[in-house]
Amino acid sequence: DTGVSQDPRHKITKRGQNVTFRCDPISEHNRLYWYRQTLGQGPEFLTYFQNEAQLEKSRLLSDRFSAERPKGSFSTLEIQRTEQGDSAMYLCASSFRTGIQETQYFGPGTRLLVL
Amino acid sequence: DAKTTQPPSMDCAEGRAANLPCNHSTISGNEYVYWYRQIHSQGPQYIIHGLKNNETNEMASLIITEDRKSSTLILPHATLRDTAVYYCARRGLDMRFGAGTRLTVKP
């Protein structure tokens, strides 16, 4: 399977715990995006990387959220001191940008439940 | 995204064309219109995109009005497997999604 993969697919945690999600993009895609999706809503952009550089992070929901893409391949999204309001689906997407053309392909998501 | 609006739900008869509207009246000149769909709890699946011209691929057609304030996704012969939530999005520096239309294809 050469699509975007995410791990884990489901995560249940207790309030106050830290969680980390992993995304493996489509091979050779230079851009990687993180989104959050709550019930009944469309995906909400959080942050993105071009290769290993994080080019936009102002839309991360709070300073408890952070993301890395250390070698320009896979990425991790960490939420520290989780709150019940963090319960959502976290989606990763990747793309290969050439000029102004770019199509993002999404992974299956990680569903987080904070108790 | 409050600036990208879609009807919450629509029904379509199997075999008929499904026409899904999207209003993006504040779209900027360099923003593309994208359509995705999402089935159950899977990730969104890319369908089609366009800037000014109408587009067609193996999945669907996209009609963008001349003033670019709205667009319509057309599934020419809807099947039961097309039942999903369809999202319209604007792509500028980032992708901004509407709240989606839940399409139900009925036999």
Image (tube, rainbow, N blue to C red):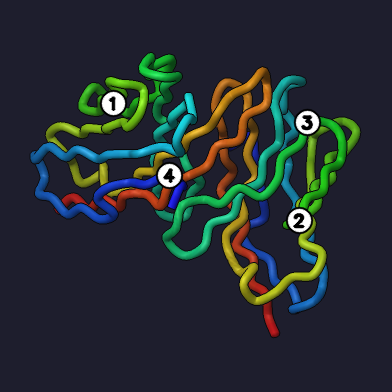
Report the disc number at residue B58: 2
Mark 4, secondary structure of its residue: loop
Label 4 to label 2: alpha-carbon separation: 22 Å
Amino acid carrying label 4: it is Val
Please, is residue B87 above or below residue A16 in the view? below
- Of residues B86 and A97, the one nearer the viewer is A97
Label 4 to label 3: alpha-carbon separation: 26 Å
Q: Earlier in the sequence, mark 4 or mark 1?
A: 4
Amino acid carrying label 3: it is Leu
Amino acid carrying label 2: it is Glu
The answer to whether tags 3 and 1 share a subunit is no
Instruction: Mark yes or no: residue A18 visible.
Output: yes
Would you identify the image quadrant in which residue A67 lies?
top left
Instruction: Mark yes or no: residue B1 visible.
Output: no
According to the picture, the residue beneath numbered tag 1 turns out to be: A67
Residue A48 drawn at (x, y percent): 42, 24
Dots 4 and 1: beta carbons under 8 Å? no
- Describe residue A87's horizontal placement relative to residue A39 as left or right: left
Residue B105 drawn at (x, y percent): 67, 74
According to the picture, the residue beneath numbered tag 3 turns out to be: B51
Chain letter for mark 4? A
The answer to whether tags 1 and 2 share a subunit is no
Report the disc number at residue A4: 4
